[in-house]
Image (cartoon, helix red, strand yellow):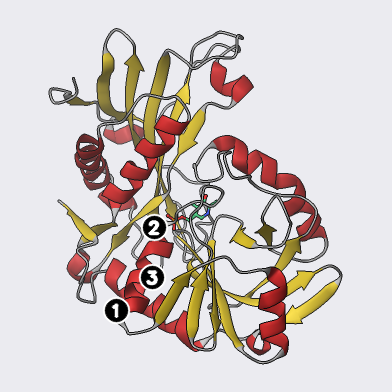
Amino acid sequence: MWEDLEVALEKVADQARKSKPDPDRLGFGVHFTDHMFLMKWDQENGWHDARICPYQNFTLDPAAIVFHYGQAIFEGLKAYRGKDEQLLLFRPRDNFARMDRSAQRMCMPRIPIDKLVKSLKALVYLEKEWVPQREGASLYIRPTMIAIDPVLGVSPGKSYYFYIILSPVGAYYAEGCNPTKIYVSDEYVRAVKGGVGAVKTAGNYAASLYMSEIAKKAGYTQVLWLDACEHRYVEEVGTSNIFFRIDDRLITPPLEGSILGGITRDSVIKLAKGWGIAVSESRIAIDEVLAANAEGRLQEAFGTGTAAVISPVGELFYKGTRHVINQGRTGELSARLFKELQAIQHGYQEDPFNWLVRVG
Ligand SMILES: *Cc1c(COP(=O)(O)O)cnc(C)c1O
């Protein structure tokens, strides 16, 4: 049905273009570009009316399913301005493939992955002036799908919007890479096996806010979630996956249904294995992590995700006790992975896994 999906182009008039934000004060996800991608789905027509159009508001019925029952999924990836002014996307196909899996779990229509990679390239090319020049800065890309039918009965929507918006974002570590302090949640949980923890769906993030606020008030920037059954096994951190380096081995929790399978996580596993580092995807209890730390065997810990790429962990706060990791400093492997991934993403380094897609 979507082989013949045409993407129309409606450009913003030159005089209606927004002024570009101050590149030193981009923040995260607060400025949006002049154009967006939008397409619609209904049972009769499938995906249709695909277009790149001016960034605009939606008019939705207050009864729209997305507002009441959260039938909404999204993705997050970035476009980088690299070597010789090239515009580069990092593993965009993997993001749309993950979104397609999210769509199936949330009873939403499958998405045309290849068509979307092409449409995204066209959109980013059109908005190329919005891709920041600064080192470490990038254009954040947010594909989203929502159910729009005005029906209060709980059942899957019969009509959907799929859209992509773009936001120039600053370097995550404007002040250099400072290890984060993390609050281990021993009471509230993020996701259960059999639930939707492995899906990038809106409700997961709403459900996480309460614990995040508790952590923030206590002076912590992120929450480390434990498994929902025993409150014992490590799951993930905020919107990042987590890695521990213990006795020169990298350990990250396995993807068993409650954890989001990060593309950065997968990239780190592949790079580390390629460097001859032992990597295990295995369950690890918080007690094991803290015991290893006390014995000096926990060399470093870091989170992985599109936003920060690699985010070193300097401290874990668990049941009222602070546990400082690696003297609160960035670990050697964290630094090496960060440097390597950034260099690949910006095209300064060979791309051995063919992760980059060139725009234009
Ligand atoms: C998006 C996300 C991640 C990281 O995924 P990447 O593909 O590496 O950006 C990890 N955990 C959660 C809960 C997420 O939403």
Mark identifier at residue 147:
none
- Residue marked by disc 1: 274
Q: Earlier in the sequence, mark 2 or mark 1?
A: 2
State the SS at label 2. helix
State the SS at label 3. helix
Residue 245, given in percent of the width and then of the height, sits at: 53, 81
Q: Amino acid at mark 3?
A: Ile
Q: Residues within 10 Å of mark 1 (few under 14, many from 20)?
A: few
> Which mark is in front, 2 or 3?
3
Image point (35%, 36%), residue name: 100
Q: Residues within 10 Å of mark 2 (few under 14, many from 20)?
A: many
Report if the beta carbon of the residue with label 2 is closer than 8 angstroms to ligand 1.
yes
What distance separates the C-alpha of mark 2 from that of mark 1?
17 Å
Q: Relative to residue 285, is residue 78 drawn left or right?
A: left
Q: Is residue 57 visible?
A: no
Determine which quarter of the picture holds residue 166. Answer: top left
Q: Earlier in the sequence, mark 2 or mark 3?
A: 2
Image point (78%, 59%), residue name: 186
State the SS at label 1. helix
- Residue marked by disc 3: 269
Image point (62%, 89%), residue name: 297
In the image, 89 versus 176, the foreground residue is 89
